[in-house]
Image (tube, coloured by chain):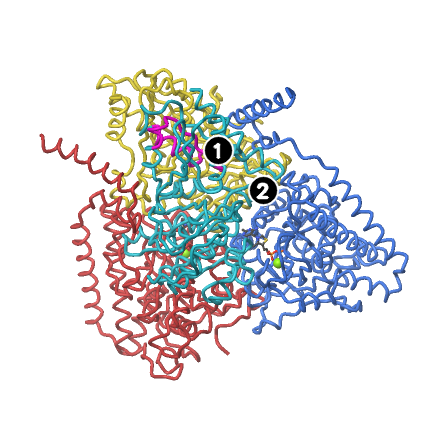
Chain colours: A yellow, B cyan, C red, D blue
Amino acid sequence: MTETRSGHATTLPIAKAITAGLRDAMRADDHVMLMGEDIGRLGGVFRVTDGLFDEFGALRVVDTPLGEAGIVGTAVGLAMRGYRPVVEIQFDGFVFPAFNQITTQVAKMHYRTGGRVTLPMVIRIPHGGGIGAVEHHSESPEALFAHTAGLRILAPASAQDAYWMTRQAIESEDPVIMLEPKKRYWIKGDVDPDHRPELSPWQARVLREGTDATLLAWGPSVPLALESAGAAEEDGTSLEVIDLRSLAPLDLPTVTDSVRRTGRLVIVHEAPVTGGLGGEIAARVAEECFYHLEAPVTRVGGYSTPYPPARTEHAYLPDLDRVLDAVDRVLQH
Amino acid sequence: MTETRSGHATTLPIAKAITAGLRDAMRADDHVMLMGEDIGRLGGVFRVTDGLFDEFGALRVVDTPLGEAGIVGTAVGLAMRGYRPVVEIQFDGFVFPAFNQITTQVAKMHYRTGGRVTLPMVIRIPHGGGIGAVEHHSESPEALFAHTAGLRILAPASAQDAYWMTRQAIESEDPVIMLEPKKRYWIKGDVDPDHRPELSPWQARVLREGTDATLLAWGPSVPLALESAGAAEEDGTSLEVIDLRSLAPLDLPTVTDSVRRTGRLVIVHEAPVTGGLGGEIAARVAEECFYHLEAPVTRVGGYSTPYPPARTEHAYLPDLDRVLDAVDRVLQH
Amino acid sequence: MSVFQTTIPAVADQEPMIQLLAPDGTRTPHDEFDAVLDGSAGGGGDDDLQTPERLRGYYRDMVMIRAADLEATSLQRQGQLGLWASALGQEAAQIGAGHASRAHDYLVPTYREHGVAWARGIEPWRLLEMFRGISHGGWDPAELRTHPYMIVLGSQAPHAVGYAMGLQRDGLVGTGDRDTDTAVLALFGDGASSEGEVAESFTFAASFQAPTVFYTQNNQWAISVPTAVQSRVPLAQRSRGWGIPSVRVDGNDVLAVMGAVRSALDAARAGEGPRFIEAVTYRMAAHTTSDDASRYRPGAEEQEWAEKDPILRLRRHLEQLGEIGEDYVKRCDEEGHDLAMQLHHHIHGMEDPDPVMIFDHVYAEPHPVVDAEREQYLEYAAQFEDEETAR
Amino acid sequence: MSVFQTTIPAVADQEPMIQLLAPDGTRTPHDEFDAVLDGSAGGGGDDDLQTPERLRGYYRDMVMIRAADLEATSLQRQGQLGLWASALGQEAAQIGAGHASRAHDYLVPTYREHGVAWARGIEPWRLLEMFRGISHGGWDPAELRTHPYMIVLGSQAPHAVGYAMGLQRDGLVGTGDRDTDTAVLALFGDGASSEGEVAESFTFAASFQAPTVFYTQNNQWAISVPTAVQSRVPLAQRSRGWGIPSVRVDGNDVLAVMGAVRSALDAARAGEGPRFIEAVTYRMAAHTTSDDASRYRPGAEEQEWAEKDPILRLRRHLEQLGEIGEDYVKRCDEEGHDLAMQLHHHIHGMEDPDPVMIFDHVYAEPHPVVDAEREQYLEYAAQFEDEETAR
Ligand SMILES: Cc1ncc(C[n+]2csc(CCOP(=O)(O)OP(=O)(O)O)c2C)c(N)n1
Ligand SMILES: Cc1ncc(C[n+]2csc(CCOP(=O)(O)OP(=O)(O)O)c2C)c(N)n1
Ligand SMILES: [Mg+2]
Ligand SMILES: [Mg+2]
């Protein structure tokens, strides 16, 4: 694959890093195409596809009719015809009309055909809460996808990851769901499109080393985890922070290595704790680090309720106080 | 509610116990109605609604057009009009076209309206594998529903529970998903329609007491858990067996009480272990019983793959050997 | 023959659009709708919907709801609302539909149905709760016989059909008594018409002949996507492949809308099965306050539609009838202004809810997990209050 | 004017059904389809699809696939298959559609498309893999230009449209070269036609004018539910509300089917957009081997349709033409018998797969979780082998 890049190392907000990733992928491979609602002339409601319609035209940046099953389902057909469709779901809460296609088709086509068909497609979903939105615009459905074998899930939390995960998701021969940290879209970071990162996208990254406990987070919760570690440091507590990055497959070794050192794990995510991905990680870590754990794995997440009205979401979402409270609890053990 | 019962204590297969539950509920309350594909004249592909079309007619036993979103979505409207619809999804794998209605509508209508609307409806799903079927007929999607706040989930594993949970699901003011253990439909048991059980449907039941470890299972895996406990006993191992019964809400106290006594927990379910409901339970038990656990909570379940072709499913599904192997592992700790 | 036809003309743009009021206010008679509007249809004795007084009422309603709508946009700019979805330009399509329904009908809206809500007697501030982010829905659907505002496009359509199936079972269809027979009006946009759930709703409604009137406000846009992407032929034709009779009306013409909606609802309540209406109108504002329409649509188009303004049109008609004076117009404007002020004060006076409400009404019956989380939350929140107090 | 009309007659049962072969085998000429069948349409020079040799070929194909189908049912009874979905009675609808497609077209079947598969050159035992439960799909869709059998009703329809959109992007539509231009045939049943995903597929295909021919075999039943529950009007009309021209043909008439499918595919490949065909046929057997049709449908109906048997019909036609003799009929029967025997031996000789295949092809790229589970499984399975060996 030729690496036609849109530019050299630069500073971009996450949203624009994804734009750059899409653009470079489209320049490098003319079978890469985009589909979704309002992604063409408007450039998407978050402007992530801004400028791509002008550059690549209506055949490669497709404003679709308003049907998510149709969007994902036609992408399956396009992928089987040799294209690499990148689909945008406008908001996390609107992925459910496509759930049948994702669960019974996207996830299973490779398996169903005994490996004869590969399905390289990407489903981009702006994901998570905290933006003051009305109902259905703040969901965190990652656990539903993580329980569905056949899917890969990436959750970039920095501009550099946003750029490269976009590229790598598109390059993957497997279908990838990319969860974009909606409330962090405008956070800037360095992006180096010239140097492919050494770390695989399917691996977690230790963002900050520490000794007293490990904080594990992904997507929109990563900045919170870092902030919490900063605050804890002021109190003399040393927290290791891991950005999970790949939610499927889970990179457990990076997490268990850390927990074996710190003896404590706090997992932070926005989805309801009940049945959330944190439970899976907690169960696995407890299995693998049974004798290293000084305290039970503790989860900080959304409550076991639907996402509440926006003016209460500050209390629903994990925040600095709740994370530190959980850290206190594991340290008191 | 008048209790018009179809008969006195008797022995019935699980499928027919559900039939009796439906019949008695329909006799007791003429707002109870059934909807689904082939549930009328045919009596459903598993014959669970057999005879009800003849007794209650086409307005109360409705053969619908072939659209799961339409079935669940019209049931929402009927419930809002004061009916108590009981919807049949023909097989677990066909619930996904209705996933948007279940996730964004059924689960959230009560919350959305600030409690002004109640949505008493039941979604019956024959659930699980082991019947030698083609693709999409052997799924175990319970974790997806358990992560969706607003839903209740019941999983009867005996004829008596099948009868009474049917009645109680219909009586509930909340929407209930009832997962019916498809491969156990023809297992018989005593049903007493005259005496409402003392145990709430939302509570787990200790089926067998034991001291060395706890086996937790639900739905189709319950007989396997009992069988395993029987086999273990021959080896001198005493296993406590719990039937979880309600998957949402989780009755954690019954489980933790047991684990505090036995110190060990093995969870058995058919769904893929990764992201399955077992992870949530393991995480919670580890949190609450941290100092009581002698070994990590261990899960026996489906692999992290799509449900495989039928001639390999014996290796995919938990069986006696795999359960006993897991028991051995927790005992060796 | 009814204007509700199952015939799709071979050439798409041959689909007629019924108009009773021209943009300059001239009234064209209409064979079928005139009798519907004057109450003489269906045996007669029904309300006359086009008395001068009523017409002035519609005018006032449209002015009021536009004032409220503009105020909501400005409240959003002031940070009082998280978002606002303006219905500017769709007043005739909404006020007409709302008043054409009978009080005992059940209405199933989208999230942009402010005129419908107004006509149903739902106070505007109730709508704003959702856009402010203090609740997900501000009224009791049973009491106001109006479904909650719905966000997931198309999801409400099967609810409408199910409700209508309930009406059938309740014996409230086809009795011949106008005050008994009931129907459901299901609203959705041109964009939402593409959702599979809308199609399944057509299937169920047709199959069970459920008394459902599907009503699309084709406001030309689904955010940035023009209606042509959803359908190459006039949307009105969509339902005919199910045998659901349909009609296309000028949605900026309150009388055409009322004629169509009233007559469709009456057919449905009489047991004649579902109907479908396309009301051709225009979303004058951006999609929502978060949207920038200049990125995708030409100003010329907005200009063109400004000339078809539904409020202006009805006023011109009333002027031609000699049934409206400067003073009435002025009074309406003032009342609109007052309403906007009320709204302003009401919203500015709204307190944020106690977050403990997060845990309320997740379930109707007790739920140990939610209850435990509520307890935890309260204990946790108390810590902070203690800290506050300690200072 | 084409038989593909966008006009829905006001009265449902006025929808014509094109028939070229009467049940007694009499051939009726047809304005439009005759030229399609004899290759003179579209500029001429195309294959003549109705030479006596070809007609005999279709007859033989139908006999063969019926023999295979009956054998499959008996294999199921012997426990060799988990399930079988018989296509008995739908041979003309399937063999006709299969042969009307061109080799470079892409076909998207349901789970009951055995005649289509046969016409595409897919050996019957490949179909049986799925029903036996040793694989979820027995062929390479790219190689055989045929999608896998699909179980979740309607789910394949958007795939067909997406594939067709790919063809457009590949420049394989509307070039005017018959061997280049390509189209997609999307099959689904009368029941599946109610799924929202089929409707969304209509929307996408119409919007993008993707070269997709939607083809419904209305075999009168969706398990126990008659087609009337899915649609009160003839299904052929369903697509017209999207402006997708459609036609209804006698699905037990191989020539009517071929005329419709060939002409629709040719229109699609020429860039004229999607088409929809309803082939009226009958599911002669129960839904599957698990079903008991006597619970819901009258024997009289089955009898009635037996008289419309598609194989008999073609044979009668060939007899009228004097183009078939006792010996040919006998030879076909014998070949059918041989095929059944082959199938029998093939299936009985099939070994069960090693369960380690469970872990193969979950992902195309390495996946640590699946790999670890495979390892665990192998270690675990080895224990038992050791135990076996130890004995
Ligand atoms: C299922 C779903 N997909 C996407 C969205 C995001 N969205 C909100 S409004 C809208 C456009 C709707 O257009 P239309 O139905 O014409 O209604 P209008 O906004 O014009 O009133 C979109 C795409 C949604 N709310 N629901
Ligand atoms: C989404 C979905 N719902 C339900 C089923 C169960 N099911 C299998 S076949 C069938 C009937 C299909 O009828 P039709 O589409 O007419 O095809 P036919 O079987 O007649 O060929 C049903 C309900 C399914 N496979 N997929
Ligand atoms: Mg619109
Ligand atoms: Mg059928």
The kind of residue tagged 1 is Gly
Q: Which residue type carries mark 2?
A: Leu
Q: Is residue D174 above or below residue A223?
A: below
Image point (17%, 57%), residue name: C341
Q: Nearer the viewer, residue B188 or D284?
A: B188
Quarter occupied by residue D297: bottom right
Range of magenta residues: B258-286
Residue placed at 58% from the left, 58% from the top?
A: D191
Classed neighbour count for the residue bearing mark 2: other residues with Cα under 10 Å, few (<14), some (14–19), many (≥20): many
- For label 1, count other residues whose C-alpha is less than 10 Å away and answer few (under 14), some (14-19) or many (20+): some
Q: Secondary structure at mark 1?
A: helix
| Same chain assignment for discs 2 and 1 | no
Q: How many marks?
A: 2
**Residue where numbered disc 1 is placed:** B230
Residue D229, image x, y percentages: 54, 64
Whether residue B169 is situated above or below residue D250 in the rendered picture: above
Q: Position of residue A178 (x, y in %)?
A: 45, 35
Q: Is residue B67 above or below residue B199?
A: below
Side of D249 relative to A242 (left or right): right
Quadrant location of the N terminus of chain D?
bottom right
Question: Mark 2 — residue?
Answer: A78
Q: CA distance from mark 2 to mark 1?
A: 53 Å
Is A195 within the magenta?
A: no
The residue nearer to you, when weighing D314 against A36, is D314
- The chain letter under disc 2 is A
